Amino acid sequence: VLQESDLQQNPELKGDLLNVAKISDGGKKQRKNWTGMWSELTSDQLLLHKERQQEAGMKAGGKTDVVQLCGAVIEWTPDKSSRKNVFQITTHTGSEYLLQAESYSTASKWFDGIKKTVDSSSKL
Ligand code: I3P
């Protein structure tokens, strides 16, 4: 049974620049192209913003990629890149995203937060 506390255990994660490479789009392989994306975790999505989000009241610009976390799988994938601290999110539709940060503490903070969101949103 989903407890209200399950929805609240995710620390608010927002405003870090993570390196992202979408390597599959709905099962279709994509050329690996690392891009810095401003990341934001909601209760059931990972938002990847091309532009840094402005303060409240100002219009947020740029493109946002929405990664649905319900039914997704997240795992560390040291063999998928020459970079360090790389993990992968595979969505329920078969899209695959590699995420990476130079700092292990930043990467693991996001890994842990996204994993909690995957676990809690997949229970709904
Ligand atoms: C890719 C690019 C990526 C690299 C990838 C290369 O080349 O250098 O940064 O991934 O390696 O294929 P290109 O720009 O010509 O497509 P990493 O930085 O994650 O190592 P890969 O093919 O071994 O994944």
Image: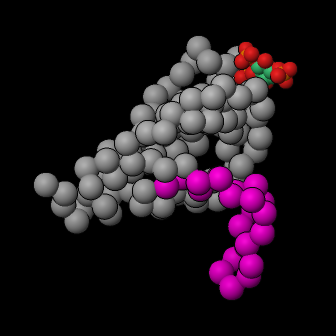
The image's colour scheme reads: one colour
> Residue 47 versus residue 30: which sits nearer the camera?
30
The relative height of residue 79 versus residue 108 in the rendered view (above or below) is: above
Q: Residue furthest bottom?
A: 57
What range of the chain is rendered magenta?
45-66
Q: Is residue 80 left or right of residue 5?
A: right
Q: Is residue 63 left or right of residue 2?
A: right
The relative height of residue 82 versus residue 50 in the rendered view (above or below) is: above
The structure residue drawn at horizontal position 32% and vertical position 63%, both measured from the top left corner, is 8
Pick the quarter of the image with the N terminus: bottom left
> Residue 95 versus residue 41: which sits nearer the camera?
95
Instruction: Note whether residue 98 is visible.
Output: no
Q: Is residue 68 left or right of residue 56?
A: left
Instruction: Note whether residue 37 is visible.
Output: yes
The structure residue drawn at horizontal position 67% and vertical position 44%, both measured from the top left corner, is 18
The relative height of residue 120 versus residue 34 in the rendered view (above or below) is: below
Give the image quadrant in which the ligand numbered 1 is located.
top right
**63 inside magenta stretch:** yes
Q: Is residue 65 left or right of residue 111?
A: right
The structure residue drawn at horizontal position 43% and vertical position 56%, both measured from the top left corner, is 44
**In which image quadrant can residue 11 be found?**
bottom left
Residue 39 position within the rendered picture, expressed as x and y whole percent measured from the top left: 63, 53
The relative height of residue 86 versus residue 101 in the rendered view (above or below) is: above
Residue 87 position within the rendered picture, expressed as x and y whole percent measured from the top left: 55, 30
The structure residue drawn at horizontal position 71% and vertical position 67%, both measured from the top left corner, is 53
